[in-house]
Amino acid sequence: MSLDLQPEHSASDIVHIRPLVRSDLPALEWEGEYIHFRRLYADVYRRVESGDGLMWVADLPGKGIIGQLFVSLSSNRPELSDGIHRAYIYGFRVRPLYRSNGIGTRMMIEVEADLVRRGYHWVTLNVAQDNPGALRLYERLGYQVVGYEPGEWSYIDHLGVRQDVKEPAWRMRKVLP
């Protein structure tokens, strides 16, 4: 569904892409849809506070947060992020109602520009093999598939229960300008 905008406006004109602030954390749960990630979001925010990560949101006035994107600047997997030249994008989503309006593209462009300002030269990400729409978006933005990722990871949900995830993915990479 597209946003009902006046002809002189686009989604890029009204959506604010900005770094997340602590008070935004509950809004990442999207009215309970992602409540199971509550602890994960808090962990990512701690990485932001320590300088090892970034959290970005797309904020639509009157509607709230409609997109989210996280960046790891350094990790124990230097092929993903090394704290110097390579950063890793993950947790990227736009609410279904607002997709196909350029919001995801704009988020990626703004985050990439921020990474360039920080001195990063490469961006990596993983895209689920069963998500052809996201794969097309990333390819259109200049990302190339460079390998396979088994996509096995785990997290502790909001109830304190370990959740194991298996999302076979394609590893993608882009050289930043």
Image (cartoon, rainbow, N blue to C red):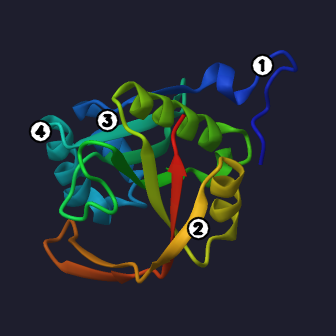
Q: Position of residue 112 (x, y in %)?
A: 49, 36
Query: To which residue does mark 1 refer?
Result: 9
In space, the residues marked 3 and 4 are separated at their CA atoms by 18 Å
Residue occupying image coordinates x 25% and y 52%: 82
Residue depth check, mark 4 versus mark 1: number of the one nearer the observer = 4
In space, the residues marked 1 and 3 are separated at their CA atoms by 26 Å
Nearer to us in this view, 138 or 61:
138
Contact (CB < 8 A) between labels 4 and 1?
no
The answer to whether residue 85 of the structure is visible from this angle is yes
Q: Position of residue 156 (x, y in %)?
A: 18, 71
Q: Secondary structure at mark 1?
A: loop
Nearer to us in this view, 33 or 127:
127
Q: Position of residue 27 (x, y in %)?
A: 37, 42
For marks 2 and 3 on the same chain, the one whose residue lies earlier in the sequence: 3
> Which residue type does callout 4 highlight?
Ser
Query: To which residue does mark 4 refer?
Result: 50
Nearer to us in this view, 163 or 75:
75
> Which residue type does callout 1 highlight?
His
Query: To which residue does mark 2 refer?
Result: 145
For marks 2 and 1 on the same chain, the one whose residue lies earlier in the sequence: 1
In space, the residues marked 2 and 4 are separated at their CA atoms by 31 Å
Residue occupying image coordinates x 69% and y 29%: 11
Residue occupying image coordinates x 43% and y 31%: 116
For marks 1 and 3 on the same chain, the one whose residue lies earlier in the sequence: 1
Residue depth check, mark 2 versus mark 1: number of the one nearer the observer = 2
Q: Secondary structure at mark 3?
A: helix
Dot 2, how many residues are within 10 Å of its Cα: few (below 14), some (14-19), or many (20+)? some
Q: Position of residue 26 (x, y in %)?
A: 30, 44
In space, the residues marked 2 and 3 are separated at their CA atoms by 32 Å
For marks 3 and 4 on the same chain, the one whose residue lies earlier in the sequence: 3
